[in-house]
């Protein structure tokens, strides 16, 4: 699901304070009346998808099996049991918090990739065209593999309601923790360390 270009961060209003009055300036024009319909349509589709999710997963539930490909075309199959704890991270290009999360996850991935007991990270872009994801990732240049959920089937099966969202599973694939929204490194590591 693509967010309209009018929702990108540059479409913000800024207030300037003049000694006598507050004036409004706009860096970019807001969408015209007809363009606002796209925003409503996107919100309605997201609401329908979240209400109609096949799974309403929570801690203690088994994570669903799935198969995806990386941005480089390499296949990945999520089918427990695993040798490591799994961090499943759903994100999107238009999500302002996701860039910070990806940078933090990339830093952790660089530490973890050559250690035996470290978690396995699955960063899944939810529903965006490969070309857009590729352009965005080229700018960040992360080492962490990026998986593509082009038709949002995996996000739908997990019952993802917003982005970013983390699902942390044990080695058997049982969801131990869910983090809705942005997570700092300390919070994420704390949740991982609580898994036996």
Image: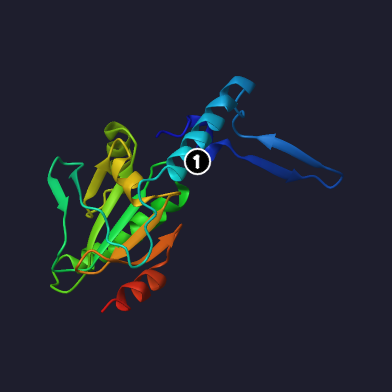
Measured from the top left, where is residue 8 in percent x and y? Answer: 50, 37
Q: Residue at x 14, y 40 (%)?
A: 73
**Which is more toward the observer, 182 or 20?**
182
Measured from the top left, where is residue 134 in percent x and y? Answer: 27, 38
- Rendered view: 138 above or below 185: above
Q: Which residue is farthest right?
A: 20
Q: Which residue is farthest top?
A: 34
The quadrant where residue 58 appears: bottom left
Q: Residue at x 57, y 36 (%)?
A: 11
- Callout 1: 10 Å neighbours few (<14), some, many (20+)? some
**Which is more toward the observer, 183 or 30?**
183
Q: Residue at x 47, y 44 (%)?
A: 51
Residue 97 visible in the shown view: yes
Measured from the top left, where is residue 181 in percent x and y? Answer: 46, 57
What residue does disc 1 label? 47
Secondary structure of the residue carrying numbered label 1:
helix
Q: Residue at x 16, y 61 (%)?
A: 80
The quadrant where residue 135 appears: top left
- Give the quadrant of the N terminus: top left
Looking at the image, residue 91 sits to the left or right of residue 6; the answer is left
Q: How many numbered marks appear? A: 1
């Amino acid at each position: 699901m693509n967010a309209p270009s009018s929702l990108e961060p540059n479409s913000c209003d800024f207030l300037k304070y003049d000694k006598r009055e507050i004036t409004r300036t706009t860096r970019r024009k807001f969408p015209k009346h007809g363009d606002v319909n796209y925003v409503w349509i996107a919100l309605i589709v997201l609401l329908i998808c979240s209400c109609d999710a096949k799974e309403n997963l929570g801690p203690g539930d088994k994570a669903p099996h799935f198969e995806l490909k990386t941005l480089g075309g390499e296949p990945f199959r999520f089918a427990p049991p695993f040798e490591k704890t799994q961090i499943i991270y759903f994100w999107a290009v238009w999500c302002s918090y996701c860039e910070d999360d990806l940078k933090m996850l990339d830093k952790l991935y660089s530490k973890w990739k050559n250690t035996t007991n470290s978690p396995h990270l699955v960063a899944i872009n939810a529903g965006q065209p490969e070309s857009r994801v590729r352009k965005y990732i080229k700018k960040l240049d992360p080492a962490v593999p990026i998986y593509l959920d082009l038709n949002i089937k995996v996000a739908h099966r997990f019952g993802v309601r917003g982005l970013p969202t983390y699902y942390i599973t044990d080695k058997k694939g049982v969801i131990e923790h869910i983090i809705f929204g942005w997570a700092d490194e300390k919070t994420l590591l704390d949740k991982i360390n609580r898994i036996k």
